[in-house]
Amino acid sequence: QPLECQVPSTTAGLILDTTEKVIGYAETVTMGCQFGFIPTPQDPLVGTCKENCQLDQVLSCVEGNCPFFNAFDYSIGVKPVASLDAVPYGGSVLIECADDYMLSDEEATEVPNLHPDFAAAELLDYTSLPASTGQAMNLGPISGFWGRMSVTIPAFGWPTGETRPLTAATLSIPDGVHPPPSSKLTFSSSVCFDFAPEGATFLRPITVTLPYNTSQDPSRWRVGVYKYDPTTPNLWVEQPLLATGSPLNPAAGTVTAELRSFSIYTSMAFRLETVGGGGDTGNETDTGGDGDGDGGGSG
């Protein structure tokens, strides 16, 4: 019987680069901590399935606390209503203006407007940059487990007249968006990324780099970047990969695509067919997706 290791998928705060419950001998799983949890020793951490059917190392995620009194500049009239030593991630604190101070206008922070099919997804991370005025833009890599995600927009590639910011929301994969078995597709990541501004068409191709599961055998799986499109039979549509250089970086665990617009994207693996009556040959007999050419279209 093949050796297998259980993936620690139920540990609080732990995130993985795979949705599989078990992995085979010598296969690896990359572990990180959700936003608001502190990793021990550090993330990302790669665990390998060993002969004893155990991972050689497992990441520990401890819920973090924010130092309370260091979070405010008391010289500008901020006065906390409660006295606390620390506030847990996701917690809230009521503050008010001190005597002789009044509340000034504040700029609202944009909240991601998620696709209805992803309403049940967990928002794991969110980052943004102001709209470009012509210069090149780089979003990411960001710290922690999702540091392998990045977006590069070349100079003068930003849509003319577009004032909305560049944003990236890291989401869990909810039920209902999994491709059908007939598609031969499986997720190569446990998350997807909702990029905005939605519907904007870039003047020059942009590059988007996403994490993927490096333990998937390249002779049996073809990894790519896929866009969510519920109007298609497979729900996900393969996108053009980076035209120059190598789009797949096994050492970094990333795959890079060239896009013209933003939507919801993730890395997926297409199961390759084999020819002949013997074992795997790595020869594919299907394209694995209905690429839309420029990776465009609204999300």
Image: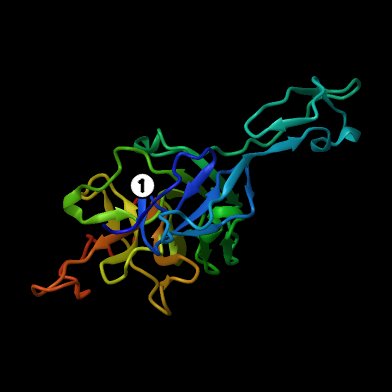
Q: Which amino acid, mark 1? A: Lys
Q: Measured along the vertical axis of the image, is residue 118 above or below residue 91?
A: below
- Location of residue 58 in the rendering, given as x and y in whole percent from the top left corner: 53, 51
Viewer can see residue 68:
yes
- Location of residue 142 in the rendering, given as x and y in whole percent from the top left corner: 59, 56
Of 164 and 252, the residue lying toward us: 252
- Location of residue 128 in the rendering, given as x and y in whole percent from the top left corner: 58, 50
Q: Measured along the vertical axis of the image, is residue 211 above or below residue 234?
A: below
Q: Which residue is mark 1?
A: 21
Task: Tell whether 123 sits left or right of 188.
Answer: right
Instruction: Report the residue at 46% width, 62% height from top.
Output: 208
- Location of residue 160 in the rendering, given as x and y in whole percent from the top left corner: 50, 58
Q: Which of the image's four quarters has the N terminus? A: bottom left
The residue lying furthest to the left in this view is 277
Of 79 and 215, the residue lying toward us: 215
Of 271 and 48, the residue lying toward us: 48
Instruction: Report the residue at 21% width, 56% height from top.
Output: 184
Task: Tell whether 136 sits left or right of 182.
Answer: right
Q: Quadrant of residue 133?
A: bottom right
The residue lying furthest to the bottom in this view is 245
Viewer can see residue 204:
no
Instruction: Report the residue at 31% width, 70% height from top.
Output: 218
